[in-house]
Amino acid sequence: MTPDIILDTNVVLDWLVFEHASGLAIGEAVTEGRVRWIVSPAMQEELVDVLGRLLYLPTLLRWSARHAPAMAAVQAWSQPVSPPGPLPHGERLRCTDPDDQCFIDLAVARRTPWLVTRDHALRRLARRAQPLGVAVLTPEAWAESQPVPSA
């Protein structure tokens, strides 16, 4: 079975818009089917909103041509899943950034092996998420944790 992965919005931007090496490595794992990128409705809504900013924010307009391809990639490669229900008391991890709560809730509820993020509020939960089966890590740390393909 293909393991699930959750990507925060900035990691998706690194992959689909800014083409950072760390984002491209994760994107390659997604498009090759080595991981399944799951998104809840709240995560999907945030991603559509942020990608839409490429079309009107002056600081992002230089990437406006990447909007349509990024949206197509989101449609092609993300796997929508239902939002999690309330978590048992011992599994509730509170994120200091309410906008990021949906990421940790989904990861814990589904015991997603990886929540990949650069966000400090989410990364502060890494130690508490580990016993629940979730590794919260940066894109670089995720890439380093993956087996090296044999030649």
Image (spheres, rainbow, N blue to C red):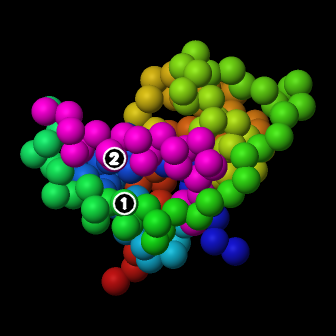
Q: Quadrant of the C terminus?
A: bottom left
> Where residue 48 appears, x then y in whole percent?
42, 48
Crowding around mark 2 (Cα neighbors within 10 Å: few <14, some 14 to 19, many 20+) is many
Residue found farthest to the bottom: 151
Residue type at numbered disc 1: Met
Residue type at numbered disc 2: Leu
> Where residue 23 appears, x then y in whole percent?
33, 53
Q: Is residue 43 magenta?
A: yes
Q: Are marks 2 and 1 in contact (CB under 8 Å)?
A: yes
- Under circle 2, the secondary element is helix
Q: Residue at x 28, y 65 (%)?
A: 69
Distance between mark 2 and mark 1 Cα atoms: 8 Å
Q: Can you tell which quarter of the image residue 128 is in?
A: top right
Considering only order in the chain, which callout, 1 or 2, is on the residue closer to the N terminus? 2
Residue 4 in sight from this viewpoint:
yes
Q: Which residue is mark 1?
A: 71
Number of the label disc, if any, that sits on residue 51: 2
Residue 144 in sight from this viewpoint:
no
Magenta stretch, residue numbers: 36-58
Q: Residue at x 38, y 50 (%)?
A: 12
Q: Can you tell which quarter of the image residue 99 is in?
A: top right
Q: Is residue 141 left or right of residue 20?
A: right
Q: Nearer the viewer, residue 77 or 24?
A: 77
**45 up-or-down from 126: above or below:** below
Residue found farthest to the left: 62
Residue found farthest to the front: 56
Q: Is residue 64 left or right of residue 2?
A: left
Q: Residue at x 16, y 49 (%)?
A: 63
> Where residue 66 appears, x then y in whole percent?
21, 58
